[in-house]
Amino acid sequence: MGIRENTTQLIENLEPVKSFLTHSHYNYILIDEKGYIVESNRFFYDLINYPVGDLTGRSLHHVIFEPYHATIKSIIDNIQTNNHQKAFAIFETYNHVLINVILHFSGLYNKSGEFAGTMILVDTVSNDSLIQQDQTVIHNMFYEDYELSLFNMILENSRDVVYIINYQNNKFDFLSPAIFEMTGYNKEELVTMKKDDILNIIHPDFREIFRSHWKGLANKPVNTKNYFSIEFKIRPKLGISRWLSDNRKLIRDKHGKLIKIVGNIRDITDFKLVEDALNRSRDRLTKAMDATNDGMWDWKLDSNKVYFDARFYMMAGYLPNEFPNTVSEWMKRIHQNDIHNVQSQLDKHLHGKSDQWISEYRFKTKHGDWIWILNRGKIFERDEQGNALRMVGTHTDISLRKKMAEELQKRNHELESFHEKLFASEEKFRQLAENTQDVFWLADKDNLLYINSSFEKIWGHPCAEIMKTPYLMVNWVHPDDIQSFHQLLDLSNLEINVPYQEKFRIIRPNGDLRWIWSRRFPIVNENNEIYRIAGIASDITAQMTIEEDLIATKEKALESDRLKSAFLANISHEIRTPMNGIIGFTGLLKDENLSYENRIQYINIITKSGDQLLHIIDDIIDISKIESNQLKIKHAEVNLNELIADLELFYANGKKQIAKDHIEIIGELKPSFDNIKLLTDESRLRQIFMNLISNALKFTEKGHIRFGYTLTTKNTIEFYVEDTGIGISSEMQSAIFKRFRQVDDSTTRTFGGTGLGLAISEGLIKLMNGKIWLKSVLGEGSTFYFSLPYSVIDHAVTHKSPVTVETDQYDWSGFVILIVEDDAINQEFLATILAPTNVTFIQCYTAEEAITVSESSTIIHLVLMDIRLPKMNGYEAFNIIAKQRPSLPVIAQTAFALTEDASRCLEMGFANYIAKPINRKNLLTMIHSYLINYKS
Ligand code: ADP
């Protein structure tokens, strides 16, 4: 018999010991005579960290640290001569950790006394205890020879309790020392303890079971099994209760009577705790599975049985176990498009090529529709060849998730195509936008996405600036329009299909103003959600200017219309007043019984009214000419001092007639200007002065009127008319220059007038390149100023001093005047005027007649020539007469109060002119001024 067979047999014989060793915490190794490992227990493998069973058949040296190989080999070789040996060595573990150990060697022999192998018990030694002693000392100590029964050694060192009880006297025959560690009572205490005291160590929950079991043992039939196992709790002397497992063997005598009980008690508290924890975690797992609704499966591959839990069946609409628990039944229900994928994933895992098996597939429900299943599984057990034995996993219904993912993908596709379309249309929009003068922009709720280059042209700011900080726009808006601009920015009220528009002004960097018309409208996507905001902004400055002009023109037209109506009301009043005077008093004159004084008074009234009427007509003609731009200015030399003196004299007389004699009228002359003549239109200058002085007189009740001129440094002459009258409020100061405007527009006005005087004056001054203005304080008085260009001819002139005659009592006897007039009444009128002067007059009714008279008669001192004559007019007649008698003064009488006619007459060489209807006093004064020259 070879040594190996020998060892095997020995092992079989050692079975009871081995079973103890297997469960004990003692490490043991059984080696053959060559030192190869035949067997060892789990604790040995735990110690050296090798997979269980991995070292069977391999040399013991495999785990011994090299320096100890020789020592160990010599012990093994000599075991048959020295049966019990002890040695210190170092083990090298699987992960190359070094462990200090003490090895107990015992030679083993079979019944025939043949050597069967060596049993080695392994004791670990802590490093600390080794450090204290010299290693050689330890060596020697362990080599000491001593006898130790293997069995005793095992019992003494085991953590399990081995006992033998004598059933007859209830006493321990044997009790191994581990009982102290297990119960807190030592061997001696327990051996002497009474049965009831021993029972007290048992946990109260188990005492009854324990007692009845004990009693029952005696009555067990002989033929039943002699092994019993019982688990119970005890209460140790100290500390918490412990779980014990007691394996008993009944030993009977040859009559079958129970005499002893041999038992092995093990502390299984840790195991119970683990079991509890395991139960709890299993419970937790079940709850978790309940919560997730996942199904579970457990597949035993060797038997090809699968366990599907109820939830898996129900997931697919089946009752639990409605279809058989087999892989093929499961496979049958997988969608044929997915089956290939499922199988290949599964194969991969079965062949160890993946950590886990995960597959998603469609699974047919009981009702024939499909649900999506996510299956996750993992192999938990493999055989020694690596074949999978058991696989466990879960089923999850992911139909909803799949549906959502599909939906999402569909949505993404839609969105992509929408984006493509949008991009294409945006591109078109962009091209369009780049070619328009309007500003186009596109934004989402937070950013400006696009703005075309027209923005730069209109706003004068770079596009980049606005793209970066859109809110800058606000700074460029006219302060008065900020509110409308903010409304445009406010997107809170965006409404689909509703554009929004605003007009506002912007200020360009150079300070120019531009009018902007801005429209914005939301852009929606296919789901009718607002996606973008687009806008157009147009520069409407030109339109706005036209519009403003139109409005202003309309306003002006309305105003002018209103003023014209007011004027018509005024003018009819102004015409009616003198007309009433003329008609009324003319009627009264017919009364033959009228006294001389009354007659004179009536005639004065009629004359005054006629003058007034004439003045109105003159004004109307002037304003029409000014407005139609037909009025011409005739420049001639004017001596300003003469003009001022003339006007002063005129008003000194005139004021009496309007009951304003108490008002002082002062014409202020500039003696240094006596020789200087201003180049201007004298008659117009006189007209302006007269308008201003007449107004001053009209609106002044007390004080004075002062008028004159000053030379300013700006090459202009400034004229002034100052009064101490009622004054003009500042609001009205510019209005009064408008035609027909009066401070008091009411029909019940205190002062007469047409409202044309100032408008005419302003028009004339403008034509003469000057300007007019005023200073006035209400209630204190007014000063009207006007300026004209200072253009003078500075030479001494033989000036005629103005002929002023205080009286109209002329005596012109000896003088001859030729009157040329086609109208008999006018002939009569002139005759009546001239008769009191004793002058001789020749009356001619045509021009031709007059020419003949002037040719034949040498004694003619003056001619009064009418201009409008039947065949030959007054101008032609004058030309002929002037040729015959150049020094003969010819005074034109013109029917029209037209200054053009007057100037034409003067230009042609008429001595002077007098306007019709003829003012008696003026006519006499004028004639006198010529006749007087004959005298001197
Ligand atoms: P009229 O005197 O015929 O009404 P004007 O054009 O000369 O027309 O004057 C317009 C208005 O200006 C007058 O009606 C009067 O209300 C105001 N005005 C003009 N001159 C004076 C002044 N010196 N003092 C106060 N008011 C004056």
Image: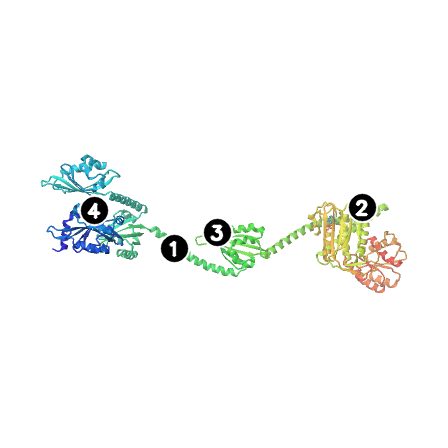
- How far apart are labels 3 and 4 at the CA level? 85 Å
The answer to whether residue 261 is left or right of residue 420 is: left
In primary-sequence order, the first of circles 3 and 4 is 4
Looking at the picture, how far across and down is residue 625, in whole percent?
72, 57
> Quarter of the image containing the N terminus?
bottom left
Q: Which residue is mark 1?
A: 410
Q: Which disc number belongs to residue 662?
A: 2
**Circle 2: is it few (<14), some (14-19), or many (20+) Cα within 10 Å?**
few
Q: Which residue is mark 3?
A: 496
- How far apart are labels 1 and 4 at the CA level? 67 Å
**Circle 3: is it few (<14), some (14-19), or many (20+) Cα within 10 Å?**
few
Q: Amino acid at mark 2?
A: His
- How far apart are labels 3 and 1 at the CA level? 26 Å
Q: Which residue is mark 4?
A: 24
Q: Given this view, does label 3 or label 4 mark the residue nearer the observer?
A: 4
In primary-sequence order, the first of circles 2 and 3 is 3
In the image, 354 versus 434, the foreground residue is: 354
Q: Amino acid at mark 3?
A: Ile
Q: Secondary structure at mark 1?
A: helix
> Quarter of the image containing the C terminus?
bottom right
